[in-house]
Amino acid sequence: MNADAARHPYTYVRRPLVEPDWRRLPGWCGVTDAQWRDAQWQRAHCVQHAGQLRAVVGDLLQESFYADLAADRARFATMSMLITPQLLNVMAPDAVSDPAAFTRAFLTDPVRRYMLPVGSDRHPVWPSHPRARRDSLHEAEMWVVEGLTHRYPTKVLAELLSTCPQYCGHCTRMDLVGTSTPQVAKARLMLKPVDRQELMLDYLKRTPVVRDVVVSGGDLANLPWPRLESFLLRLLELESVRDIRLATKALIGLPQHWLQPAVVEGMGRVAAIARARGVNLAMHTHANHARSVTPLVAEAARAMLEAGVRDVRNQGVLLRGVNTTPGDLLDLCFALQGEAGILPYYFYLCDLIPNAEHWRIPVHQAQRLQEAIMGYLPGYATPRLVCDVPYVGKRWVHQVAEYDRERGISYWSQNHGIGLQPAEQDRRFPFYDPIDTLPEPGRRWWADGEGRP
């Protein structure tokens, strides 16, 4: 390594965004550009089971992959399979057509690792942490009405629906979102959508301390635009609401939805009213690897900004084998910020959900990663790496109050209560590193059952 490389371990090289040619896949060899850009075509051709995957890739994937996939479906999967063509297309984009080589490239692909997990991905000894929970952030405990989580003093999360155009394996709302799997009988929203929204709006009218509303789900792209626009316009009538954030991974997984003329025009109407009333309207999306940021994604982000959305921001998740090296994380941030106009905002430690240990990293690794990326991006575009601590909320990874590295237990303090409840100033709230990353005494302590609930 030369002296310059030692001083600057990451070298920035501008890389234009690429839309891989979907025609390389046998099942899509005749798909036209117009079909690919059509949101309804994308939805109608999502991959929901192994048979549909075979229909797309033909003989490119070996039988060993399907056996691995079936093992995961039977033993570990917390999310049902649902992958848009847009996301499937960015997996193994440069793999050769030899089945053995294609299968190897597909297995190691970073987007595949979180969108289409297989059994061999999971940790063989610790697939789940003993402290893992289906609703790991206890959001349902904090519902003030169905689907409305009041966790922070001035902010709420409004879950308008429980479906998405695509399902990520590491979904933090795996308890509620999507259809049931052999491992997880999903919770359900029971009220009619119109009744749920009425109760949410009524609570916000009665609770003027709330100034910031994250409108989410599920994914807003699955809500018919007229219904979403109606809810947003009523939200904008509340003088106490000053920030509205629209959460949609579909900007990455289904950018075609956000490019539909009716959606773009509708967003323009909402944005104009927000601007006139001095309300900050932003969109939050979820990209975890540079490969998923394509020209269509950039086009959709520009369409939202031109419609009047103040910012498009990315909230990713730190995932082993995907983005937990400085190079991978910086590549993603430069693709987002430099090429797609999407602001790198947060990267979360993967939450303590079941069967997620192969994705999670320890707090100390996230701390080193935060330090490693400093100085490369503009300050406003340098993402914060955060730990979302149950009963505490988001904390920068360096804000840990105490840290037992041997047993992998970090302790965090509250500076505010949950919702309208007072803070417990003297209490420390734990978060847990993945057990396989601990030194031997720590692994033995957990194996002996000492840390189990």
Image (cartoon, rainbow, N blue to C red):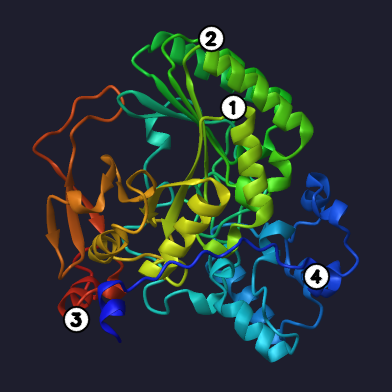
* Residue closest to the eye, 327 or 387: 327
Distance of label 1 from label 4 (alpha carbons): 37 Å
Q: Describe the element under mark 1 as helix, strand or loop.
A: loop
- Where on the picture, by quarter, is residue 131? bottom left
Please, what is the three-letter code of the amino acid marked with disc 3? Glu
Label 2 amino acid?
Glu
Tell me whether circle 1 and circle 4 mark residues in contact (CB < 8 Å).
no
Q: Is residue 83 above or below residue 250?
A: below
Q: Which residue is mark 4?
A: 56
Q: Which residue is mark 2?
A: 237
Nearest to N terminus: mark 3 or mark 4: 4
Vertical order, 272 against 167 (above or below): above
Gap between marks 3 and 1 measured at Cα? 54 Å
- Residue at left 36%, top 43%? 380
* Residue 179 visible here: no
In this rendering, is residue 136 above or below 200? below
Q: Quadrant of the N terminus?
A: bottom left
Which residue lies under the disc numbered 1? 308
Task: Report the amino acid beneath label 1.
Answer: Gly
Front label number (1 vs 4):
1
Q: Could you tell me which residue is drawn at 15 percent across and 78 percent down?
A: 441
| Residue 165, horizontal then vertical, whole percent | 67, 48
What residue sits right under mark 3 in the picture? 440
Mark 3: give few (<14), some (14-19) or many (20+) Cα within 10 Å: few
Q: Residue at x 69, y 39 (%)?
A: 258
